[in-house]
């Protein structure tokens, strides 16, 4: 039987005014693919391009640079880079060409082997793609550019020519073997794309008001109130389970089925593992990745590579860790020996903690060896009955939120004279020429001995003190106790 596929063009649904969102004006797009069977039965599937903050960053690059540089959008696999960039081409240019180097023809690849005659290069490119390029009104997208380094090297000449704009997207883009034989173009700006943050997640649910309202409450240091707090914590826990990967969010919106969402996240994790095996065929990289939840669960002050790979030499292990971080699927928090505004200069590269850049993937990785139906994490987290020994899930959430805000991740430990265990402050963030210590708790427990000892020892360096927990906003002397959903506002 013949199946006819009708694809509807992506449509602009609405444009959020700045006055309402107090944030970037970003269009939301949607479209559908409808399959009609011979008996007239329609099988329709939604395609969403979610409202993403990076759209405005790309728009700013276009306005300010006016073709003087190319833009490289980096990010982990399946974070939505290609979707956003292609939509940007549709909305902001007269036309565009998308060159996906994971699927493009050998004829297109061969064009990049000699770009000495750019008139001929562009003529051939238009003939092969069927797209008519308009000078200063067209965009050429190099998608998955890490798969074809010659295209990235060509950016220098293409930008200098100045006929068109260029945006590259890449995953695992900084792995050395992908760039060792090419000249990295200096005419290249970079922007890092993260998974959807909590505000973007709320936008997908039609909630444009919550984050602007929370900003006002934080400024006035006022609590949200019991009813609003319960609602926000439930939304936060939902975000922790689903995460910010667009495929997982779309699966939730379409199915409202946690098992379907979990399967999507497992598929993404398998993609990452396939990437890791391409980099290191021994499987060591995958082992280090899979061990992140277990390492955090031990409440240790560092990620201990020797616990996973006992015979690994320290130098080799640091190379593997660097490749994990380069994948953008992993976040690293480094121990700093000197808590101050210059603490980045005092980080210890051998002493670190690892987190996943998406907490939704983290929740799935925690129980990867079990079937979905065998664990009750989803039910317990949504009902706020998560056991205390899963508190590191909240620590991963805090790491993701602080990173999305542009903070580097640092922590500090120091001796506790009265106990064998050290004091530890979970995160240190820089504000101005001072620092803010941040302690994270997975409950409403308000004790903060480590925070107090740290503030007493480094009082001259501190501007504000935060404890992130699960209760509503309140103050405890000079410590501001914030609910986890306010972390993005720091």
Image (spheres, rainbow, N blue to C red):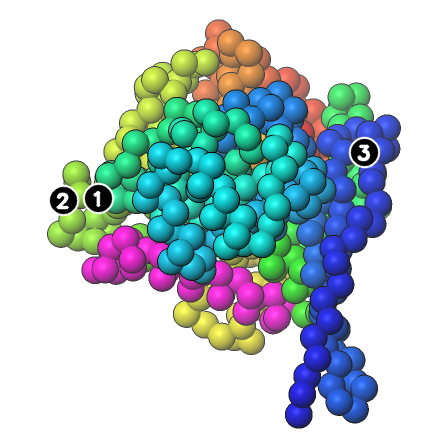
Image point 61% across, 54% down: which residue?
A: 246
Across and down, in percent, residue 189 comes to 48, 28
Residue 469 to residue 295: above or below: above
Q: Quadrant of residue 188?
A: top left
Magenta stretch? 258-285
Measure the alpha-carbon separation of dots 2 and 1: 6 Å
Circle on res. 174: none
**64, 151: nearer the viewer:** 151
**225, 77: nearer the viewer:** 77
Viewer-nearest of labels 3 and 1?
A: 3
Residue 124 covered by magenta stretch? no
Q: Are marks 2 and 1 in contact (CB under 8 Å)?
A: yes
Viewer-nearest of labels 3 and 2?
A: 3
Residue indicated by mark 2:
313
Tell me the element at label 1. helix
Residue indicated by mark 1:
317
Across and down, in percent, residue 329 comes to 44, 47
Measure the alpha-carbon separation of dots 3 and 1: 45 Å
Q: Is residue 278 left or right of residue 427?
A: left
Q: Earlier in the sequence, mark 3 or mark 1?
A: 3
Tell me the element at label 3. helix
Across and down, in percent, residue 17 comes to 85, 33
């Amino acid at each position: 039987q013949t199946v006819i596929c009708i694809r509807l063009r992506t449509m602009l649904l609405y444009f959020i005014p700045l006055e309402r969102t107090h944030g970037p004006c970003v269009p939301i797009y949607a479209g559908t693919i409808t399959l009609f069977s011979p008996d007239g039965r329609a099988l329709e599937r939604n395609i969403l391009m979610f409202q993403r903050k990076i759209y405005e960053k790309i728009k700013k690059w276009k306005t300010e640079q006016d073709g003087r540089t190319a833009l490289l959008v980096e990010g982990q696999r399946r974070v939505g880079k290609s979707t956003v960039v292609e939509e940007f081409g549709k909305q902001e240019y007269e036309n565009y060409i998308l060159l996906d180097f994971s699927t493009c023809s050998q004829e297109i690849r061969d064009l990049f082997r000699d770009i000495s005659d750019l008139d001929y290069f562009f003529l051939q490119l238009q003939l092969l793609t069927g797209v008519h390029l308009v000078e200063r009104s067209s965009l050429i997208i190099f998608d998955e550019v890490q798969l074809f380094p010659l295209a990235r090297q060509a950016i220098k000449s293409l930008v200098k020519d100045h006929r068109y704009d260029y945006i590259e997207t890449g995953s695992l883009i900084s792995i050395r073997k992908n760039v060792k034989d090419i000249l990295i173009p200096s005419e290249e700006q970079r922007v890092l794309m993260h998974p959807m943050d909590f505000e973007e997640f709320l936008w997908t649910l039609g909630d444009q008001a919550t984050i602007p309202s929370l900003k006002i409450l934080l400024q006035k240091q006022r609590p949200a109130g019991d009813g609003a707090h319960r609602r926000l914590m439930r939304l936060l826990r939902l975000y922790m389970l689903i995460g910010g990967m667009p495929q997982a969010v779309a699966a939730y919106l379409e199915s409202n089925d946690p098992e379907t969402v979990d399967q999507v996240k497992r598929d993404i994790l398998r993609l990452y593992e396939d990437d890791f095996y391409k980099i290191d065929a021994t499987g060591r990289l995958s082992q280090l990745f899979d061990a992140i939840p277990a390492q955090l669960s031990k409440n240790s002050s560092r990620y201990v590579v020797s616990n996973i790979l006992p015979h690994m030499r320290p130098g080799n292990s640091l190379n593997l860790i660097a490749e994990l971080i380069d994948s953008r699927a992993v976040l690293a928090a480094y121990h700093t020996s000197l808590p101050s505004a210059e603490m980045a200069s005092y980080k210890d590269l051998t002493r670190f903690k690892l987190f996943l850049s998406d907490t939704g993937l983290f929740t799935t990785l925690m129980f990867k060896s079990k079937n979905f139906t065998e664990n009750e994490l989803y039910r317990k987290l949504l009902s706020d009955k998560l056991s205390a020994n899963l508190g590191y899930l909240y620590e991963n959430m805090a790491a993701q939120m602080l990173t999305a805000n542009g903070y580097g991740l640092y922590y500090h430990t120091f001796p506790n004279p009265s106990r064998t265990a050290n004091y530890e402050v979970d995160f240190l963030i820089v504000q101005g020429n001072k620092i803010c210590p941040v302690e994270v708790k997975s409950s409403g427990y308000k004790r903060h001995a480590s925070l107090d000892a740290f503030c007493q020892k480094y009082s001259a360096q501190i501007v504000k003190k935060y404890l992130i927990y699960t209760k509503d906003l309140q103050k405890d002397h000079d410590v501001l106790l914030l609910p986890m959903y306010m972390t993005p506002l720091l």
